Every structure is written in C-alpha cells, then in structure tokens.
Image (cartoon, grey):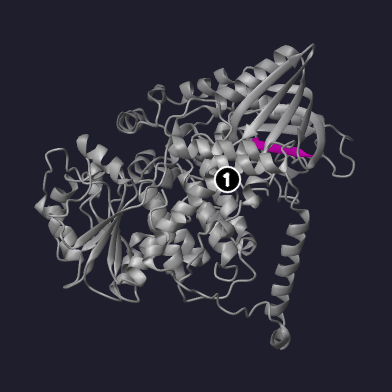
C-alpha cells in the first residue's frame, strides 16, 4: 500500500501506482522525473539522487519554502529545520526523548546524519522478499530511507521500479558474508522480512552498519515526520479533528454534572495528562490538585466514558500512594464519592493481582482502602504488561515464521506464547467493566500502577463494546485520540522495537497491538457492527511503530507540545480521512447496531489474527479478491436505488447481543 509521504522528500513522487506487495513503508512505482528535467534517463536521475544524498539535500523539505512545494534544484544547499538554539535547549532539558546534541544547531544535525551513512550507494543489489519476484538494481541510503531502483530491462512486466523503505521500520539487521558476496536480512517492525544480496564484503558491512545506526536514532525531532511534506496536505490539518471539548459537549447535552477543567494547564499537575480533563462539576480545582498528589504521577481520577443509557461513568487514574503507613487523602475520597449517585455503588477494577498491589503498597503505592472508600468494591483482574507481554509477542512471531513446524509443534508453540491468553484476559476485563456499567448500573474506576498501559487497554475496549459511536470510523479515531494518545500511553517507549529486535528490552510492550487484536476479535465475532475494516487496524499497527506522520510520536501530550509535533508534522488522521483512503477503510458489511456487543471469550471463540501475524507468510490474494467483490456489490447497492430491494448485502440484521453475567468474567489470571 503506497503511503503518501513515505518516499523521501529528495524527489517529488508522481501519483502512486498500484499498491506495493511490500506493504507499508514501501512504494512501488515508475521512476519519477526531477522537476524541470525533460527526458531525463534512468542513469541521470539516479546520479542526481546520489548527489543529493551526499549533500543530505533531503533535509530541504523542512525549510520554510517546503510549504510551497518541492525544492526544484538538486544538488543544493542543506536547508534544515528551524531549530533555534534557545528552543532546542529548553526542549532537550525537559524532554528526555530529545538528544542534547541538537543544541549544536542545523549544521551539526546534517553532519550527524552524514556520519551515520558509511556507504550511500551500491550497484547490482538484489532484493528478495516473500510474495514478490526478486528485484535487482541500485541501492541508495538517505537519512530516513532505503531506495532500490531497478536496472533498466530487469523488470519488463512491471516496468522500472523504485522501492522505498522507511529505515525507522527496520527492527533488526542480520548480516552474513561469504567470499565476495554479502547478505543482509532486514526484519521490519511490521513483521515483513527482506533480504539484500550485496556484492562486496566491505560494501555489505558498511550498508548494514549504516542501517543499524540510522534505525537506532532515538531523538524524536530527528525522525522522518519532521522532514516529511506530502503533497496536498497542510501541516495543521487533522490535529484538531477530535478535541476533548467535542466529547464534553456530547456529555453536557445529557447532564450538567461534569465540567472541563484546565487544572493541568502547562502540565503543572500531571505530565502525562492533557491540559484539559473532564471532572465532576461540584469539585473545584484545589481539590483536584491535592488529589493528584495522592496518585502516582499525578494521575487523579478523571472521566473516561459517560454511558448515555443510564448515566453511569467510567473513570481512570493511577494507583493511590497509600504506602506501608496506609495514608489517607480526604480530597481523593471526596472526588470518588462525588461521582456516585445517592444510594449507588461503584467498582474499582485493578489490573494487577492482589499480591502485586500489596507489594506496590510496600514501595509506596497500593490500592484503595475499604474503610476510606466504603461504597467502592475492589476487583483484581491482573493483566500482563512490559517484558512478559513483549516476550509473548516475540514467541508468537517466531512460531509463525517457522516454515517446517508440524501441526503438534505449531499448536504447542502457539499455546506457549500465551498471546491468545492475553487477548482473553483483556477482553474479559473489558467485559467486566462494561457489565458493571450496563447491567449493574454502577460506576467504574480502572487503574493499575501508572495508569498508562493496561488501564487504557481496558477503558478503550469497554467503550468499543458499549458505545456504537466508538464503532464508527470517526468515533474510533476519536477514541484513539482521547483514550490512547492524549491519555498518555508512551508510544515512543512501548513501540521502540517490535518482535525481531535483538536489543535488550527496556520499556517495550505491545499494549496497543493487543488492543488492536482485541478489536479485530470483536470485528470477527460481530462482522456487521464495526464500520471500519481490518485494513484500518493494520494501518494503525504499522504507523504506531514507524510512520511518516506525527500522531504516534512521543510519550505524552507534554512531550508532543515541547517537540511542536502539531506545528511541524502532519497528522495521520488527515491522510486517513482523505476520500481516496476513507473508502478503503470501510467495512462493506456494516449496519448500525445500537446494542452492546458482548464477545465470547471462550478459547474456541478466539482466533489468531492471521491478517497481521501471517500477512507476509501466506498470500491473501483470494481473500483480498473476495473483499473487493463484496465492496463492488456494496457500491452497486448504493449506486442503484432501484435494485436495493433485492440487495441484502447492505441491509444486514443487527448482531445478537446476549451479555454474560458479571460472575462469568472472573479472574482468569
């Protein structure tokens, strides 16, 4: 799938051709001409590319003139991003993901990229990857991309090809040298595996070293979204599509007991919360400030979801700082008691085990004391995060990539990875939260330790289950913006590596991928109830790990504000909401379903997400053709009103929805 803006801004690209079988991060198209060049041949075009690479002229896309179009002269002077020394110094001092070396200015940034590229161009390189014929051509390395330009006449059926790979998408580099040839295996974060056969031992080692260095750059402001300027897109488009004020207005139309608070203006109270949050109207900001001191990281309880049917709400926070001395906080107790209506009760769903909560209490954390919160009942539903979840992901991908595995060994590996057990646990806990709200008519508070991982997993999934609005394409985007991005999920840390990396695990964890997998399970069990298709989930997975857009950059809104991502990068939503992309993300079987969708979490009901984990291993040609035919029939239904009476495809019956009892979602470990 060619993605606008994934190609390096060294050259303007023509309208994309057919979708590349290499998927996200690759574009597959005829060689573009340089602006103003008439009849430039392949060799001339490629020589200009390499000349531009040597001068790092691709950085010119970040100049102020880049808003008016592509630079028309190559090679040319390096035009670098407007990093003022004072600005960069202030940012790097407060934002840990920005390298202090940026204080050296634009020239130092150019030199930094140049020093990482040991060999910029190699001839006669062959690229091999699953489901694509080998391509031989010239390999070039830029600061953010690998470019393979096919040799003339090498691909007569397809014509000349240019294949672009975003280097940030590379998760692991493996090299093997024999005689005068070298082989580099690139294992990507989107799970595809590529192989480069390079003539010459020195060239092979230099190329591998360059890719490893460029893919390991950790500074946010040196990543491609700050240099990418796609055509027909404006920088500020898409960033204000789903403000929290819109969600509050929807709640305000139902009740006046909730208000928008700017208590976290300038991120003074909580560095991982957005500047504005939704809180009880009867609680003033002074109470919120004191309650924040009683919660880890200042993440005091705020509204996550309002259930229009009965007025119940779901809150989220971090753990209370009870400590071994069993501290109290009157303001925190007041905040939670205010949420409950007279005579009502609430449930606190802790995503840790009771033992883990007790251990946290000895370290200064803990969970709510029954004596201090008499109307709240505590439920422990432990969900894995961090290293255990990352290792589960890696084991699953390893099992999927084993071509010689027998049936018994495959089933054994699948079970030992425990990935589907994590899916079951997440769905079970989300169902529990949803049932407390829908059936028990009780308010719910969800938290774990920090409140930025499994907490968001549960609150977001519960809303997809409960709210038909969150199952629309725009509603789902709004949910992601509100419950993942603005809520402070640390994408930069959690998605630093995927399943192939040999680096020592730090803070990586596929929490967001687990959420997408659970949503896919919902879509499979209720094929008519989600307006978006699997394609959207795949796109979100790819862009969370490596993207040309700034939506998933950084770990919090504070860091995004310091890095000025909304001013200097493009929004993913702006691209997805273009009509040409929008129609490809829709589920042609969708019919609005106002009911709550209660998924089955029995082992027989959960399946491996083959569209993701097997996408580069097994061809999906026939399935893609089937969906294309369904979309064609759906368009015919829309275009021919006189035929609609005989078309049942667009008028599916709503899904059956039979909720499970609350006791059915017990602690599964």
Left or right: 577 with respect to 459?
right
Look at 34% across and 49% down and name the residue there. 351
Q: Quadrant of residue 431?
A: bottom left
Q: Position of residue 308 (x, y in %)?
A: 34, 74
Range covered by the magenta-colored residues = 161-165
Q: Secondary structure at mark 1?
A: helix
Relative to the observer, which residue lies in front, 499 or 46? 499
Q: Position of residue 622 (x, y in %)?
A: 78, 57
Residue 516 on the magenta span: no
Relative to the observer, which residue lies in front, 130 or 449? 449
Image height check: is 574 above or below 199?
below
Q: Position of residue 598 (x, y in %)?
A: 47, 68
Q: Quadrant of residue 13?
A: top right
Left or right: 110 with respect to 325?
right
Which secondary structure dominates the residues rendered in magenta?
strand
Residue 74 in view of the camera: no
Residue 304 in view of the camera: yes
Count of picture labels = 1
Residue 164 on the magenta span: yes
Q: Which residue is mark 1?
A: 542
Residue reaching furthest to the front = 408
Relative to the observer, which residue lies in front, 646 or 141? 646
Q: Position of residue 609 (x, y in %)?
A: 61, 52
Image height check: is 260 above or below 652?
above
Image height check: is 173 above or below 9?
above
């Amino acid at each position: 799938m060619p993605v606008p803006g994934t190609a390096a801004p060294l050259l303007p690209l023509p309208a994309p051709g057919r979708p590349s079988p290499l998927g996200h991060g690759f574009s597959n198209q005829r060689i573009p001409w340089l602006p103003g060049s008439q009849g430039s041949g392949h060799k001339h075009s490629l020589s200009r590319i390499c000349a531009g690479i040597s001068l790092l002229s691709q950085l010119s896309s970040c100049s102020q003139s880049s808003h008016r179009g592509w630079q028309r002269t190559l090679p040319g002077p390096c035009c670098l991003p407007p990093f003022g020394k004072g600005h960069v110094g202030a940012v790097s001092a407060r934002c840990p993901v920005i390298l202090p070396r940026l204080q050296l200015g634009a020239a130092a940034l150019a030199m930094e990229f140049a020093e990482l590229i040991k060999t910029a161009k190699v001839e006669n390189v062959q690229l091999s990857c699953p489901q694509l014929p080998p391509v031989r051509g010239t390999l070039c390395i830029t600061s953010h991309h690998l470019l393979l330009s096919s040799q003339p006449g090498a691909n007569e059926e397809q014509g000349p090809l240019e294949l672009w790979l975003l280097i940030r998408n590379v998760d692991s580099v493996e090299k093997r040298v024999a005689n005068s040839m070298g082989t580099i295996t690139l294992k990507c974060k989107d799970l595809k595996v590529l192989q480069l056969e390079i003539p010459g031992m020195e060239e092979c080692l230099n190329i591998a070293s360059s890719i490893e260095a460029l893919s390991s750059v950790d500074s946010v402001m040196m990543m491609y979204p700050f240099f990418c300027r796609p055509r027909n897109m404006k920088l500020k488009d898409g960033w204000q599509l789903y403000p929290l004020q819109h969600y509050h207005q929807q709640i305000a139309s139902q009740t006046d007991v909730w208000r928008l608070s700017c208590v976290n203006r300038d991120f003074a109270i909580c560095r991982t919360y957005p500047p504005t949050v939704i809180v009880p109207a009867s609680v003033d900001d002074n109470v919120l400030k004191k309650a924040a001191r009683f919660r880890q990281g200042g993440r005091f309880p705020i509204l996550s979801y309002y259930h229009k049917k009965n007025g119940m709400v779901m809150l989220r926070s971090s753990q209370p700082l009870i400590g071994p001395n069993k501290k109290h906080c009157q303001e925190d107790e007041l905040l939670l008691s205010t949420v409950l209506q007279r005579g009502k009760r609430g449930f606190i769903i802790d995503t840790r085990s009771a033992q883990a909560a007790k251990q946290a209490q000895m370290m200064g954390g803990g969970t709510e004391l029954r004596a201090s919160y008499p109307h709240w009942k505590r439920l422990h539903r432990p969900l894995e995060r961090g290293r255990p979840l990352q290792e589960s992901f890696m084991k699953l991908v390893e099992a999927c990539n084993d071509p010689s595995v027998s049936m018994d060994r495959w089933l054994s590996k699948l079970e030992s990875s425990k990935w589907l057990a994590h899916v079951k646990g997440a769905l079970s806990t989300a169902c529990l939260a949803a049932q407390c709200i829908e059936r028990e008519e009780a308010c719910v508070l969800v938290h774990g330790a920090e409140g930025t991982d499994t907490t968001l997993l549960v609150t977001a999934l519960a809303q997809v289950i409960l709210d038909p609005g969150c199952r629309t394409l725009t509603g789902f985007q709004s949910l992601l913006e509100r419950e993942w991005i603005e809520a402070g999920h640390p994408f930069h840390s959690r998605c630093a590596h995927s399943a192939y990396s040999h680096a020592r695990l730090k803070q990586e964890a596929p929490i967001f991928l687990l959420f997408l997998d659970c949503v896919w399970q919902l879509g499979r069990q209720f094929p008519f109830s989600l307006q978006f298709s699997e394609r959207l989930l795949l796109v979100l997975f790819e862009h969370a790990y490596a993207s040309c857009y700034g939506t998933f950059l950084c770990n919090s809104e504070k860091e995004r504000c310091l890095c000025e991502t909304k001013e200097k990068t493009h929004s993913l939503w702006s691209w997805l909401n273009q009509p040409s992309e929008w129609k490809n993300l829709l589920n042609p079987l969708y019919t609005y379903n106002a009911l709550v969708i209660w998924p089955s979490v029995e082992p027989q009901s959960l399946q491996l997400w083959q569209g993701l984990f097997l996408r580069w291993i097994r061809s999906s040609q026939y399935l893609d053709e089937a969906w294309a035919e369904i979309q064609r029939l759906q368009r015919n239904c829309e275009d021919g009103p006189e035929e609609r009476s005989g078309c049942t495809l667009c008028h599916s019956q709503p899904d059956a929805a039979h909720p499970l009892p609350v006791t059915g979602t017990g602690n599964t470990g």
